[in-house]
Image (cartoon, rainbow, N blue to C red):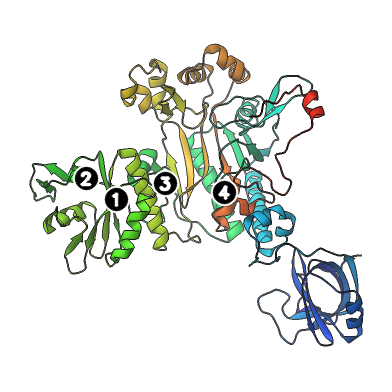
Amino acid sequence: MYRTHTCGELNIQAVNQTVTLAGWVQTVRKFGSITFVDLRDRYGITQLLFGENLNATLDNQPLGREFVLQVTGKVAERSNKNPNIATGEIEILVDSFKILNKAATPPFTIQDDTDGGDDLRMKYRFLDLRRAIVRKNLELRYSVNRAARNYLHENHFMDIETPFLIKSTPEGARDFVVPSRMNAGQFYALPQSPQTFKQLLMVSGYDRYYQIVKCFRDEDLRADRQPEFTQIDCEMSFVEQEDILNMFEGMVKYIFKTVKGIDYNETVQRMSWDEAMWTYGNDKPDIRFDMQLLNIKSVFKVNGEIKADGSLLNGVDFKVFNDAETVLAIAVPGIAEYTRKQIDELTEWVKRPQIGMQGLVYIKCNADGTYKSSVDKFFTEPQLKAIADAARAKAGDMVLMLAGLEERTRKAMSELRLELGNRLGLRNKDHYKLLWVLDFPLFEYAEEENRWVARHHPFTAPKPDHIDIMIQNDPEIRDAANYLQHPYANIKANAYDMVLNGNEIGGGSIRIFQRELQEKMFAALGMSTEEANHKFGFLLGAFEYGAPPHGGIAFGFDRLCSLLGGSETIRDFIAFPKNNSGRDVMLDAPAQIDQKQLDELSIQLNVK
């Protein structure tokens, strides 16, 4: 027997017991004729005391960091207790020990405040995984996984596996493809999601399906993306949108309670996509704080007057506002006391290439009722007050304004709002706020291709009262400059996203389940009948054999874990992640394969 106990379970009740522990040496501290060793395993750390009788042996067999060690000894009460660890009241008086394996000196210290950088730790990820902070992340991931499975099981969902080697149907992100040796010149694709399979399972009568499943997308990476990622993938038959929302609100609340001990009893707010875009500037708003975006372009009335309703005279010549497509404002609470240096920092922030604005206009609403602005020479104080009132500012607030093209300005103001939320401490990682965003556009217009593309995916159903618009109208865009006037621009999807603290954690829709409507959808996306049958004939055919109404949702499992763990990157919650170039630096993958393999696969490389 290598061990009778783990390094995290012994406490004061175990004093005088003889035990055997095994683990890795964390630290060695020699004090004259005695030596203290911290022994670590997955469960914790226990202090070992080597007395005088073993010191000579240690001199001949010195211990090093990360040596694998087995010890037997008696549990004793510590004189210098450590309240920060579960075993901090005891130590082991070692009677005998055995070095099970020696270790080279690690390239970084294996502790929470390590001296290893990201690249080094990813190269030696098997060592990084020994750190307690990383282990806790994976323990949280397992807890989320287990909680989701328990909830879905209790609600009669079946875990059904679907294939990883499928057919490439490129719509949206690029597929990863896999060559077939037995079918020369042909390729499988790795699934971007099990979308069509879960719909087929609904046709097959398995009315509540789920998987916690790997998905693959060949995308450019960032903190919340990996080429392979995990979804909690779910589908239900004979449901409407309300059924889906209620079921999966329940699942997330169950995870909060089980994993974090949080009773999330408040009603989950719902917001249309239009409201989210106009009020917050993006479709996954962080509603933990207010600071809503307000379009104050209408405040500026050319050749107008200051009226009783507070609208602003624009006899002044301030072309930045007068000529802009839009003028957006936010009232930031309590920062009227910002110094010129702090305001200049914000101005430089919005000028960064990632934000792309020319400048920032501010109005300070001072506590004494006066107004101070960066555009004092253009506006009188009553006019500044009118702008501040239009922005719903109060005494002590500062109004920040951006002007320019609609889309760019809205995106920039959304980013500025989030940045200020961070700076003012309004985005507390321990404060969770859920939101449903509903009624997305069904289509987006791709200018380069002069055609409609699916905003979610081509199996998303229109809202029931918009189906006739889709059936009765031709999708062709004859006037690209006025595509917003096309009937398809106003079709809303029967789709929904769940947002947590400004991050999309899940998204889904009610699906199309009639062949005629699905064919209409494919045609709207520019697919010929032949192409639709080639790519999705199996699904269209299935719809002819009694497909039920159905819908579902998929949660970004890695992202949900990272948010519950208070991290900004999903890599912290994946055992063996890729870097931002999509490489596994530990395995050095992707890598070349030898010519024999290429020949077997009938592949000839043309690398430039």
Name which residue lies at 33% across and 26% down.
Answer: 484
Residues at marks 3 and 1, CA–CA distance in whole angstroms: 14 Å
Residue 547 visible here: yes
| Three-letter amino acid code at the position of disc 3 | Gln
| Three-letter amino acid code at the position of disc 4 | Arg
Which label number is shown at residue 437?
A: none
Residues at marks 1 and 4, CA–CA distance in whole angstroms: 34 Å
Residues at marks 3 and 4, CA–CA distance in whole angstroms: 23 Å
Q: Nearer the viewer, residue 601 or 276?
A: 601
Residues at marks 4 and 2, CA–CA distance in whole angstroms: 40 Å
Which label number is shown at residue 359?
A: 1
Mark 2 lies on residue: 320
Query: Which x, y percent locates residue 362?
Result: 25, 56
- Pointers 1 and 2 in contact (CB under 8 A)? yes
Q: Which label sits in the foreground, 1 or 4?
A: 1
Q: Quadrant of the N terminus?
A: bottom right
Considering the numbered disc 3 on the image, is that residue within a helix, a strand or a loop? Answer: loop
Mark 4 lies on residue: 559
Q: Residue furthest top?
A: 530
Give the mark, 3 or 4, whose residue is nearer the N terminus.
3
| Three-letter amino acid code at the position of disc 2 | Val
Name which residue lies at 34% across and 43% down.
Answer: 410
Give the mark, 1 or 4, whose residue is nearer the N terminus.
1
Mark 3 lies on residue: 354
- Pointers 3 and 1 in contact (CB under 8 A)? no
Quarter residue 34 falls in:
bottom right
Q: Is residue 378 left or right of residue 588?
A: left
Q: Nearer the viewer, residue 268 or 6?
A: 6
